[in-house]
Image (spheres, grey):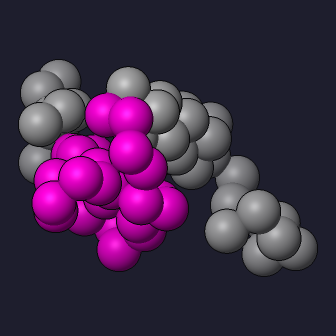
């Protein structure tokens, strides 16, 4: 399981969850990625989400259709 260990109070946390042959990236903000057979790809999904959506300069754009 991947944890965002360097987070403070009130910040979101990403993890990977395994169910059978699949791994899924999840975040405490409610986001979750697609089921992946490769754990590494699920971890990459989590890292990409954390970087794109929870960076300090987060300027959430409601027109973003990638989620």
Q: Residue at x 76, y 63 (%)?
A: 66
Up-down relation of residue 65 to residue 20 (above or below): below
Query: Residue 7 occupies which quadrant of the picture?
Result: top left
Give the left or right position of residue 17, taking residue 49 as reference.
left
Q: Residue at x 16, y 53 (%)?
A: 18
- Quadrant where the image shows the C terminus: bottom right
Give the image location of residue 6, x and y in percent: 17, 24
The foreground one among 40 and 26 is 40
59 part of magenta stretch: no
Res. 5 in view: yes
Residue found at the very far front of the displayed protein:
21
Q: Specify the segment rendered in magenta.
A: 13-39
Give the image location of residue 55, x and y in percent: 52, 36
Give the image location of residue 45, x and y in percent: 49, 41
Up-down relation of residue 25 to residue 46 (above or below): below
The foreground one among 54 and 36 is 36
- Quadrant where the image shows the N terminus: top left
Q: How many marks?
A: 0
Give the left or right position of residue 57, taking residue 55 as reference.
right
Give the image location of residue 12, x and y in percent: 28, 52
Res. 43 in view: no
Give the left or right position of residue 62, taking residue 11 as reference.
right
Q: Residue at x 31, y 34 (%)?
A: 39
37 part of magenta stretch: yes
Give the left or right position of residue 65, taking residue 50 as reference.
right
């Amino acid at each position: 399981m991947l944890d965002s260990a360097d987070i403070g109070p009130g910040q979101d946390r990403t993890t990977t969850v395994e169910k059978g042959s699949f791994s899924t990236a999840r975040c405490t903000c409610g986001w979750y990625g697609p089921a992946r057979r490769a754990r590494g790809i699920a971890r990459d999904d989590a890292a990409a989400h954390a970087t794109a959506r929870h960076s300090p300069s987060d300027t959430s754009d409601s027109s973003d259709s990638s989620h």
